[in-house]
Image (cartoon, rainbow, N blue to C red):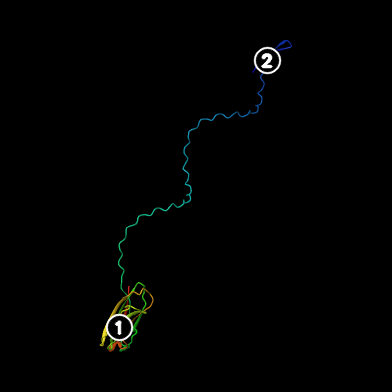
Amino acid sequence: MNGFRFGRSRDFLSIFWSVTGPTGSQGSQGPTGPTGPTGSQGSQGVTGPTGSQGSQGPTGPTGPTGSQGSQGVTGPTGPAPMTGIIQISSTSSTASSISIGPGYQSFLALNITPQSIANRILIIANAAGTNNAGRDFRATLFRNSTNLAGAQNFISTNNTSVTPFSATYLDSPATAGTITYSLQALSVGGTGAHYNQANAVCSLTLQEIS
């Protein structure tokens, strides 16, 4: 600023007028001061929009098997199985009187092949026999080599006149293979019995039944 200044030089009092010079150039910037304290927290901003759904994660492991449930009620009884005749085979003979001896002799035979091992075979045989005095005529049914009457016979007679006879037997062969059924007879006491005496008709019928 302008003003008066007093100074002493060589013991002389001098009075002179002082004039302010021009402003110098700006000095370089000083170092940054220390960080001030943290200000108080501002108010919470508005919530942003919901983001898109992420992709589905992998399937987790299978859980343990649950306990067994209680048993259901029993259903109604089904209808009884149907039964009936599956097949019928028959044969007959009108041969004249044939003499037989002490061993079994087949005079009528017929084959059949069952369709199931559970099916049965109904055997129906008809014939006529006679014998000489002192002889017995005996007849039975065979399945292959088995006498279906066991140690007995279906027919036994010592009548010397012609005697018609019949035999019916329900067999359970338990096979689906071919079976031969036969009507066989023998003479007890020696040769002298006869079957198909007086040209009687001899027949053998097989019925497979389910």
Percent position (x, y) of residue 97?
30, 89
Secondary element under disc 2, as helix, strand or loop, is: strand
- Which is nearer the eye, 183 or 75? 183
- Rounded to the nearest angstrom, the CA distance separating label 2 from label 1 is 183 Å
- Which is nearer the eye, 104 or 43? 104
Residue sitting at x 68%, y 15%: 17
- Which is nearer the eye, 23 or 89? 89
Image quadrant in which you'd find residue 121: bottom left
Quadrant of the drawing holding the C terminus: bottom left
Image quadrant in which you'd find residue 195: bottom left
Q: Which residue is mark 2?
A: 17
Give the residue type that dot 1 points to. Answer: Arg
Mark 2 vs 1: CB contact within 8 A = no
Q: How many marks?
A: 2
Say if 204 sits above or below 118 in the image: below
Say if 48 sits above or below 119 in the image: above
Q: Which residue is mark 1?
A: 138
Q: Is residue 161 left or right of residue 24?
A: left
Percent position (x, y) of residue 23?
65, 23
Percent position (x, y) of residue 75?
31, 60
